[in-house]
Image: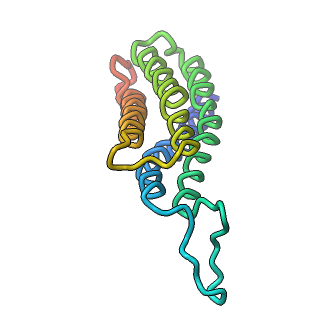
Amino acid sequence: MTKILLIVHVLAAVLAVGPVAVAASMFPAAIRRASARPTQEPALEPALGSTATPGDDGPAMAGARLLHRVCRVYAVAGVAVPLFGFATAGAMHVTGDAWVIVSIALTALAAAVLALLVLPRQQALLAGPRPSTATERGPARLAMYTGLFNILWAAVTVLMIVRPGSSTGA
């Protein structure tokens, strides 16, 4: 049973946290591109079939919205990672080991960064008036918070592999 829990835990981490890490990392550049472009495509000849409509944000903003949605949806799915992590640690009888406790703390911190800093700032950049990328620090700060989120998850991954103090020798 322990092996099954560990497999599900690792799969959940790869399939849930991975997309959030990638999409969140791509978002600041996408929002910069969206804010640098006009709100709709230039009028094309009717035969070419322009996809822009009045009030349309255009493809660049649509891309940023899609990245934000990926972050939100996979963040919810990411709740499975610590749930199966706790189950795996319990089955392995390592819940009190220092590497597990540090991993739990770093996971909680990463979740807080995502929920309190990354996702709200993405939403604000999507909802607010289009900032000038030359003067607005929003995308740069968001990139910094996203980097912090990714570093925290990288540290958790290293702890899961190295497991300092583990008696298994692996």
- Identify which residue, 126 or 63, lies in the foreground: 126
Q: Residue at x 58, y 24 (%)?
A: 88
Q: Position of residue 119 (x, y in %)?
A: 54, 35
151 vs 68: above or below: above
Q: Quadrant of residue 2?
A: top right
Left or right: where 77 falls relative to 18: right
Q: Position of residue 100 (x, y in %)?
A: 45, 18
Q: Position of residue 94 (x, y in %)?
A: 49, 15
| Screen quadrant of the C terminus | top left
Q: How many marks?
A: 0
Looking at the image, which residue sits at the far top?
96
Q: Residue at x 36, y 30 (%)?
A: 155
- Identify which residue, 34 or 71, lies in the foreground: 34
Q: Residue at x 62, y 25 (%)?
A: 83
Q: Position of residue 3 (x, y in %)?
A: 58, 33
Q: Residue at x 58, y 51 (%)?
A: 65
